[in-house]
Amino acid sequence: MPVSPAMLADPSVTGPLGGLALSAVRAATPMMVVRTFRWYRDLARLGIHLPLFMVHDVGLLYSSPREQMEIGPRPGTEAILARVPRAQELQAAYRAVVAELAQSDACSRARTMRLSDDLVVVVLARVLGSLAQRVTIKPPYSATIPLDPELPRDLDAQLGQLFGLLPRNFELAALDALSRARLHILTIADALDLDTLRLLGMLGPESSAAGALAHVDLLAATSSPAANDIVNFSLELLPSVLETRRNTSTGTHATHGYAGLGTKGSIDSLVLTELAWDETEFARRYIENEILYYTREQAQDEARRLHLILIDASASMRGDRQVFARGLAIALGKKLQLQGEEVWLRFFDSRLYDVQRTRPGQLPAAYLLGFKGERGRNPARVFAQLATEIALLRQREQRDPVIHLITHAALHVPRPLVTEVRRQAHLFGVFILPSGGALDLDYLDLLEGHAVVDHETLTQQKARAAAASKIVDEVGHLAEKAHLSPTVPPKSRNLDEGVPPSLRGGGASVPPPSIR
């Protein structure tokens, strides 16, 4: 018996499962049904309350191969629904909508993408989100069904009992709302932006640790009018980027015997007298990190390289500039990741926004697509904050930062501030020119390298893609140059004029007084 007698008294279990009597799609395995439990719970966390059977059916249509599901009513449900007024009529209309969705091109394409659970939740929110607002009856149970694979196993025999344990006004109201909004639902489903889903799938799954916040970013990405242009541009660049292979290198480890004692080490370095303790005391010492190990003399590790991609999100970067900048940032981040580099991404306008730390094989693409900056523009403040944070990063975490700046050609920053940033990090720039504009910045000689993209290039699809691809291809060579060269900029002019003492560069090895 899938639902035990103890669980029969729990409405959060019997409510959603009993509603599956109205389902029009049957999954091949119980684990596929367990996936729908998660979609159902995640939608509720977003404030979208729908019956489980709708989430189950539509979600499977977009995520599961056709051969792993069967479209049609469950056996024995006619007798169950015959006792409820209008249930058979509403279910027939619902089955017709499900059949139309299953035959749509968008649904067929989505099934080939093998969407992650987070992306399926976003698809369901886009397709069925407006339907939830039309249902005026609140569900009489909470969306907290356990993710237990035994619950949906051999469930058909128990559906009649589960369906009758609770009133089904909520499920019938949802069916009625769907029948009245049929054309609206089908239109939204046909207009679904599958290119965005494809890009998000190529760049790796988003972090699930953020929960509902991750889904909010995904929804913002699929809802942004400008996101589709960025997605299309990124898809032009990624095929060549994905061919990147990581270059391996040799490593060293100090040997020649032991040099002392410490509290970290491997089992083969354990001080043998530690085994003389009884089991209880040994366990306590292990838990409190008091176990002693022989340690080896080893050279200090070199500072680890870190790539920070800074993207201008001010009003000067709207339209084609925004598309180019964010598409380039996505391709650039993926290129560096495939080379084995660590990448952070950060937006700025009049301030620096929070750092988005990437994980191997994953980029916060939804965040990049949906971010909006509306705080004006203050380059001097941004670079002053950046100089302080980079200095702290170098001192506390022993990192070797490489900054990639993507901005417009009018980013006027006081030269001493750029010098201070350059003293702490490698600095490269990509400058996007306005129509008829020219690049006239007094700090270009301080950069280790820069690229210029004019307005005419942005207006031509092939030229734009070629320019971005060239920049991405050169990143690997620039990264190698940054790895081998010191982070000391060329001598600047008028360095100390009008600059606070904490930002005056007195040499490559002298940090600002605030962090001495």
Image (tube, rainbow, N blue to C red):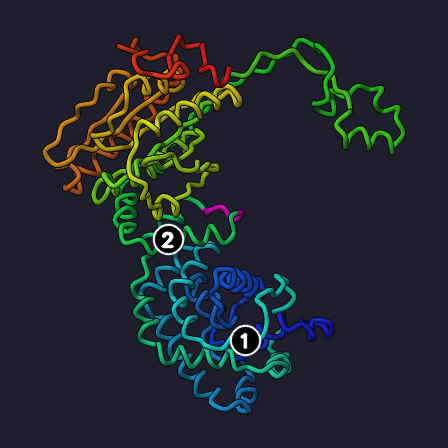
Q: Is residue 282 magenta?
A: no
Q: Amino acid at mark 1?
A: Leu
Q: Residue at x 42, y 84 (%)?
A: 92
Up the image or down, 44 lies above or below 329; here it is below
Magenta region:
205-209
Disc marking residue 405: none
Up the image or down, 250 lies above or below 193; here it is above
Mark 1: secondary structure: helix
Compare marks 1 and 2 and give the one earlier in the sequence.
1
Question: Is 397 on the left or on the right of 470, as rendered?
Answer: right
Residue matched to label 1: 20
User: Where residue 204 sits: x, y (%)?
Assistant: 44, 45
Mark 2: secondary structure: helix
Find out whether the residues at labels 1 and 2 contact each other: C-beta distance under 8 Å.
no
Q: Amino acid at mark 2?
A: Ala
User: Where residue 287 sits: x, y (%)?
Assistant: 77, 32
Residue matched to label 2: 220
